[in-house]
Image (cartoon, rainbow, N blue to C red):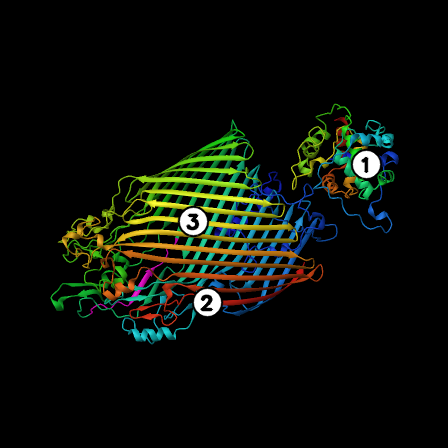
Amino acid sequence: MRKLQLLLLALPGLAAGAASAQVADGSDTMRVGDMQYGNALDPRGWTPMMAGIQDGLLSNGMSWLHAGMKRTPTGVPYPYPPQADDGTPVAPGSDWTYRGLLQLGYIHLNGDRNAEFFRQYSDWKNGLALGYLGLMFDNRRTGEYVEFRASRLSADDQYYRLRAGKYGSYRIEAFYRDMPHTVSTNAFPIWNGIGSSNLTLPASLTPGASTPAQIAAASAAAPRRSIGLTRTRSGLSLEGELYRGWIGTAAISNEERKGTRLWGGPMFFAFNDLQGGINETVRPVDFSTTDVNLSLRKVGRVWHFVGTYTGSFFRNHKDYLDYQSPFQLQNVVGVPQVANIYQGEFSLEPDNDYHNLRLDLSRELKGNGQFSVAAAWGTMRQNAALRPPVTCTGVLGVDMAPIGGPNYTLPCADWNTPAALSQRNANARIDTGLFDARVNFHPSSSFGWHAGLRWYREDNKTRYLAYNPQTGQYGYISENGSQGSIVPGEVGIFDPRNPLYWSSNVTVRNVPYGYDDTLFELGGDWQFGRRNSLGVAYTFDHNEPKYRERKRVDEHRIKISWMSRSFGDATLRASYEYARRRGGPYNYDPYVQFFSESLPGFVDPVNGLPAHTVADMRKYDLSDRNESKARLIVTYPFGDATTVSATFYGSRDQYATPIGRQDTRSTGATLQWDWQPGARTTASAYLGIETSHMGIANVGDSDGGAAGAALGTPGQTNPNLGGPLYPYGNQWWEFDRERNSNAGFTLTHDFGSVRADLSYNYSGSFGHVGYSYATIGALAYRAPDAATAAGNAFPDNKYRSNTLDLGFNFDFTRRFGMRLFGRRETGSFTDWHYLGFDQTLSYGQRIYTDKGPQHHYGVTMLGALFNVKL
Amino acid sequence: MIRPLSLAALVMLASCAAAQDAPAPAASAAAKPVAMLDVRAQPPVHGDANAGAAKAAVCGACHGPQGVAIAPNFPNLAGQSATYLYLQLKAFKDGQRKDSIMTGQAATLSDQDMRNLAAHFAALPAKPAGKPDAASRGAQLFLAGDPAKGVPPCQGCHGPAGQGPASPWSGAPDTAWHTFPRLAGQSALYVGQELGDYRHGKRVGVSNGRIMEGVAQHLDDEDIQALAAYIQSL
């Protein structure tokens, strides 16, 4: 608020300075809010103002200089411009003119109007709607203008924007908008307090003591709810000349996100014979993000200068979620349950700040060259108060004394207070640095070359030690203690003085991931004759990640591109690139220092420490990789009115590792047809299809199954594939396939007093997750019937939607008109994650909330909007 | 940015009847409005220069036997773009331009006659170049325009020396450069008169007139005078 006031105070001075501005600069450097202002009714945000076509004299083109429509350098025709409205003088003799449009009417929905995919980003409602309100004032003598634009479908789906300024001098913009984002319209949470930080169970359920039947009944009785949020954005920006060519900008925007999101709620896992609880909860979303942007630039005789400050400030007004679990815990050893954990807590996103300062300089060089250099420094910080590891009272853990075992219980009081933390606040910080220099020369019209060097550092300065000064113990108690209350000893702590915990290898420090990256590029462009050009670029990317399996990753990449107009009227663009990534030695476990095994007093288990992971695995972002990409784009004009363009593309990645990502492939094609015989008629059609594939190889650790019995034995220290912990028989492979296709058709025609528009869009996707495994040792469940049921794939996921729009604009008089429009949208959806949820959301020790999107839906929307030209 | 031939045509108009600031369209009785002559897709015009020469005697009375006008109120036709000359004759004949003399002269010409006449005058040697003052206001307007006033440089379409654009025409949708006239050496009186007509919207019957109308709107009397003097000296 204070910053806003300062900006407002600065405004008069800025405007006054700008009044004498001689430098015309219309660049939109002050992007605040959104790039465009539209909504589901009109995504473009100004279509109503484009009604009408150029008069007949321009029907043969859009310029008096030439007939027909010019095309872009690659052959795509430019669109016809809308008819210019000269406006009405504000008063007789005034230099100010105005024009405007009010579009007001009624929208009616019929069918499955609450279908999730129909409502995803729009809040359609039956009733009155402000389709559009646009008002523009122009002073053609001075170049000053004022523009207002608004639309309102509902209180959660509306926008208003005001712009004013003087061309070449200054500009002011203010906006406000609400945008809905619906995640589900088919949710049945059992809790009270949805949207708050505290989820409590209904009276019919007892925390930690409800039976699955009671929970199922509560779920069946729960009312249907929608899950989603509304984004409310507002902002103010200014731009103008401050002093002799120095142009300043200032912008501030704020986004409030309020609503709910589907969330988790574990009480240890709950399958097979393990009795924990799985809760699909609902968390609150109550965020504010304030962005500030200040810049100063000058185009001098020699140097061009831009200095920028960017700040972003995130605040979460609900920074935790407490929930009650209805499930009763039962430990795996069968002793009486001394700890009944039924309260869970999540710490949600903390408040954080971001600052970035950047300086850009560039200048011309002799020999038709240009040099530019940029340097930036940024910092991200958060210092929120940390929450205690647990919220339970009483004790947690398992007491095995009744069967002669140790007592693995802990008093919650030692851990449910901030005093149990090594520090009260996060003190987290990541700094970034950037240096980017680039030079390019065009010594002749047919040859140019460029070189660049970019260095970027992300330095994570966050250091946290999970240490409880009250008890002298290390670690972080997981899942509010529920895990340790089911499996004896798996509490999540290390205690060098207690034999029960001195061999617990638990995480005790955060891993401050970061990296340095240096990128060098050298390239050239050659023009062969008037119709062909060739480009070659080589890049070398040297990355030094911190606390990762490799200390160095290098990638060489070469890209060749060719553009040709040698094939008749066609424009052909083709490119191919090949990259080879290698790196230093791969250490499969660089994380020792972050685990309690590195602390004094740690005692190796009798059978040694289990291997951190399989040594033969290569993580996909560090693995050796060969990559190829190719793309071909052909644009062909037929006469003056028709253009056909086709794109073919593909990429292949191969990873050199027996365990981890194996390969990815994608292949796609698009075909587009555009027809623009005149300003009154346009048509287009589009087809696109893309297939992708990914292969993954993995291995399960041996837990006493058919393929081995090494976990818990001396063999557990062996990290190698084929060893006792990771036997070949435990290998499994995943094959993902996806296919996305879409098609569209549009047609618009102006009959004179009636304009018609028709569009049809189809979107479809198909997903297949297949797998195979060496032996049933790779399966979590190995019972014969389970192995038989496993098959070789999950059920396929499918999604399709069809949308048909038809609209008519009638001009009754020059001032009054009407828009009638209709939409028919249908869709179908199948996702195995939701299978069975239409019957029940309760499965033993698990309770779900979201039934998922409707399998089939159909909605019809009709609207009538009355148009008045202002 | 003046259009000599239109000038030329005008010339003829002017030639035989001191420029008629003729009343625009409204004047002619209840005549049907004449459709604009859209020349944006006009291909280059060719004709038989010899045949044209045989019919040029009457033209020479005002425009000179060799296409160099006998008086400053008539345009020079020698060396002018054949396409431009043809289009102006056609406009006079079809009514997009009106002049008491030229309308009558063009009325009896066949389309081929017009092409031949245009080819004849285009083939004649243009008036020799003069000595322009590169420091004059007219030179500034002609070569650089006046961005602050919204005036583009004339040379963009009429060539750096006013001898007409040299760009070849590659077909639609390209600018039909050959429809733009040569300006060099036209008399200041004639150029000033035509620019005034453009400024007042009196020459919008041909699509190119719409371009010049937009340009001339931003010229004041002093600018027109300076430009006309400079063009005469080219």
Name the amino acid, label 1: Asp
Q: Which label belongs to residue A667?
A: 3
Q: Is residue A268 visible?
A: no
Of residue A696 and residue A337, the one placed in the foreground of this image is A696
Foreground label between 2 and 3? 3
Badge 2 crowding class, 10 Å Cα cut-off, few under 14, some 14 to 19, many 20 or more, is some
Name the amino acid, label 2: His
Residue behind mark 2: A856
Q: Which residues are magenta?
A: A337-351
Q: CA distance from mark 2 to mark 1?
A: 74 Å
Residue behind mark 1: B113
Q: Chain of mark 3?
A: A
Q: Secondary structure at mark 3?
A: strand
Q: Image height check: is A182 above or below A314?
A: below
N-term-proximal mark, 2 vs 3: 3
Say whether marks 3 and 1 touch (CB < 8 Å). Answer: no
Q: CA distance from mark 2 to mark 3?
A: 29 Å
Q: Is residue A91 visible?
A: yes
Of residue A217 and residue B49, the one placed in the foreground of this image is B49
Name the amino acid, label 3: Thr
Q: Image height check: is A844 above or below A238?
A: below
